[in-house]
Image (spheres, grey):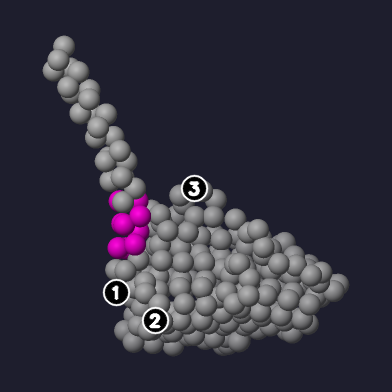
Amino acid sequence: FMRRALRYALRQAERPFRALDRGLRWRLMPYLRSCYLTLRYVDEWSTFPAIRVLGPFKVRIRKGPGARLVIHRTLQFKFFRGTTGPPSIIYLAKQARMVVEGTFEMGENVRIQLAQGALLELGGQSATTFSGMPGNCTVYIMRHARIGKDTGLSWKTLLMDSDWHPMDGALVPLYTEVGDHVWVCPNVHILKGARIGNDCIVATSAVVLAGDYPAKTVVAGIPAKSIAPAPTWSFEGHP
């Protein structure tokens, strides 16, 4: 009886230490992984670690010869829906460059692929609480594209600056831009040559073709058009 009582007392005494150990591992391992990813893949940073992985997030980064990843604030990976999903993948081909100007957040199953010599600029946060891609977004860049400051791309957004297949024997990428403080709703396709102005709202399932879309408008339809002035909005309260 005394031995059983002693073992029970020891187990009870160990419980807070076990909880502390689990807590340290939960916080320490993502931090160490963030440090490793920063040192391994980031060529220039202003804060350390420049890549921040929150929790057991799956992320893969691949870089070709001469490719550069520049992060002036932080590139942050986190779960937006509280569940695990496919890993987010960033692939920079030979001599490609990806520049993150402010804090930019990514959820699960975000795929960014830059062709040889391509440039992708991400404005990140400046005056709002969110800028990024919550999950299931695809960005394929052959030459040059920019996502402005304080801009969010919702689930299942596609962004491309090229057809990625020759048309009439030619493959011609066009500069593609999503302006500052733009709200891109789910299932939107932004195709080559689209230039969306600042403070726009791109409605769900819109297909945005090449052309200029004025600032402070609602962009909607297939093909998309500016259909109305955009209301005042913000990302405040974003989960």
Which residue shows up at 55% across the image and 75% down it? 124
Which residue shows up at 35% across the image and 51% down it? 26
Residue 143 lies left or right of residue 176; in this view the side is: left
Q: Which residues are magenta?
A: 25-33
Which residue shows up at 14% across the image and 15% down it? 2
- In which quarter of the view is residue 91 placed? bottom left
How packed is label 2: few (under 14 Cα within 10 Å), some, or many (20 or more)? some
In the rendered view of the protein, which quadrant contains the N terminus?
top left
Residue 15 in sight in this render: yes
Foreground mark, 2 or 3, reads 2
Task: Determine whether label 2 and label 3 are within 8 Å by CB.
Answer: no
Q: How far across and down, in percent of the image, does residue 216 sit? A: 78, 77
How packed is label 1: few (under 14 Cα within 10 Å), some, or many (20 or more)? few
Q: CA distance from mark 2 to mark 3?
A: 30 Å
Q: Residue furthest right?
A: 228
> Label 2 is placed on what type of residue?
Trp
Q: Is residue 166 magenta?
A: no
Q: How far across and down, in percent of the image, does residue 139 sit? A: 54, 72
> Which mark identifies residue 45?
2
Residue 38 lies left or right of residue 219; in this view the side is: left
> Which mark identifies residue 212?
none
Name the residue beneath numbered marker 1: 40
Q: Residue furthest top?
A: 1
> Which mark identifies residue 83?
3
